[in-house]
Amino acid sequence: MRAIVIHQSGGPEVLTLQDRPLPAPAAGEAQLRLRYAGLNYVDVYQRQGGRQAPNLPTVLGKEGVGTVTALGEGVTGLEVGMRVAFGTAAGGAYAESVNLPAKMLAPVPDGVSDEQAAAVMLQGMTAHYLAYSAFPLAAGDLAVVHAAAGGVGGLLVQLARRTGATVLATAGSERKLELARELGAQLTAGYDDFAALAKEHGGANVIYDGVGKTTFAAGLNALKIRGLMCLYGAASGPVEPVDPQLLNSSGGLYLTRPSLVHYTQTESELRWRAGELFDLIRSHDLQVRVDRVFPLEETQEAHRYIEGRNTLGKVLIEM
Ligand code: NDP
């Protein structure tokens, strides 16, 4: 099978197309013929190396959709020919086929396209746990959503609005702020202005921050007393170490640094989050915006595209 393999950390040029053997699925695994892989910012961190570096050589890609072609021993609830999607794989999605633990697969219902399923599993389940579990939003809350035209951001704006919360969206360009408004954000601001705007509205109950280094400090200033800083990513770089006393002097704040894995702890939790997203797609209550689709052999270009901050929605790789 063809796959994109990396043998060393580095720029997009380390992503190389190769033929790889495909072993039979082990006990508890399903083998999938993939149609699309979803690109995520975490793939960039993993390619670059550093704290999230995988063991090399490896095939990147945590998210995708495909058809079950074989089942390992002991797998129940799945059948050959079923359409399934995943968003919490350790890697392996930039390939024509992959073997994955059956418990991380969600059957895709009719009414959800392959593109939508591949686009929503990682970023959508992340938006779901952020809005409904890490800080369960309620009507009247003010939520700041950074990078609101991005993958997680665009979905989070929509889920947050469904709770009745007010969404203050930030993004890096006027075109992206316009998209955030189209998705439902009532307030928008640049990264330099959002804290002042949040304060004008009484302060934020929660900041959803996947940008990190360049937004974290201003975010602490934008929260109301006992607000939550939900730091879930570092697209601009990691945040410097924080003195806990700062949370006191800024208003008895809370700080959390969650990952999707903490909120998909069981098969039933994962399928609940995926199932709710699929239901919202089927009822046209969640807009899944696919921005670009690159063929597998152009994966380097796809990485350049997301690193260049060009994305207005999801980027997919087609096998
Ligand atoms: P996005 O599509 O949101 O892309 C990242 C965006 O970050 C860019 O488009 C850009 O938007 C913004 N950004 C701000 N500053 C920078 C910078 N210096 N360099 C690059 N981008 C910058 O990606 P994802 O939706 O895949 O991921 C968003 C964040 O969420 C990432 O940090 C990711 O690691 C994290 N994440 C965390 C998860 C978790 O469970 N903890 C799970 C999934 C993702 P703009 O131009 O508008 O500023």
Image (cartoon, helix red, strand yellow):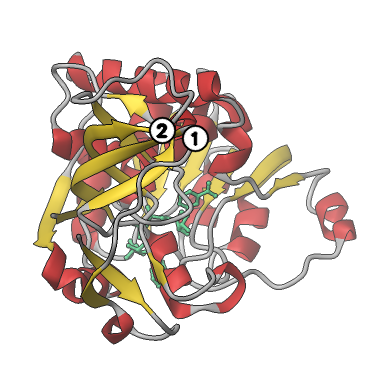
Q: Is mark 2 on a helix, strand or loop?
A: loop
Which badge, 1 or 2, comes first in the chain's sequence?
Answer: 1
| Front-lying residue, 58 or 210 | 58
Q: Do the residues labelled 1 and 2 touch (CB within 8 Å)?
A: yes
Residue 130 seen by the camera: yes
* The N terminus, quarter of image: bottom left
Residue sitting at 55 percent across and 27 percent down? 141
**205, 313: nearer the viewer:** 313
List the residue tagged with mark 1.
Answer: 27
Q: Quadrant of residue 244?
A: bottom right
Identified by mark 1, the residue type is: Ala
Dot 2 corresponds to which residue?
A: 72
The quarter of the rendering in which ligand 1 is drawn is bottom left
Residue 137 visible in the picture: no
User: How would you rate the neighbour count of disc 1 (Cα within 10 Å): few for under 14, some for 14-19, many for 20 or more?
Assistant: few
Measured along the vertical axis of the image, is residue 154 above or below residue 214? above
Q: Which amino acid does the dot numbered 2 rest on?
A: Gly
Q: In which quarter of the image is the C terminus?
A: bottom left
Classify residue 175 as left or right of residue 104.
Answer: left
Q: Residue at x 15, y 35 (%)?
A: 114
Q: Distance between the residues labelled 1 and 2?
A: 5 Å
The residue carrying pointer 2 sits among few (fewer than 14), some (14 to 19) or many (20 or more) residues within 10 Å by Cα, namely some
Viewed as shown, does residue 272 lie left or right of 304? right
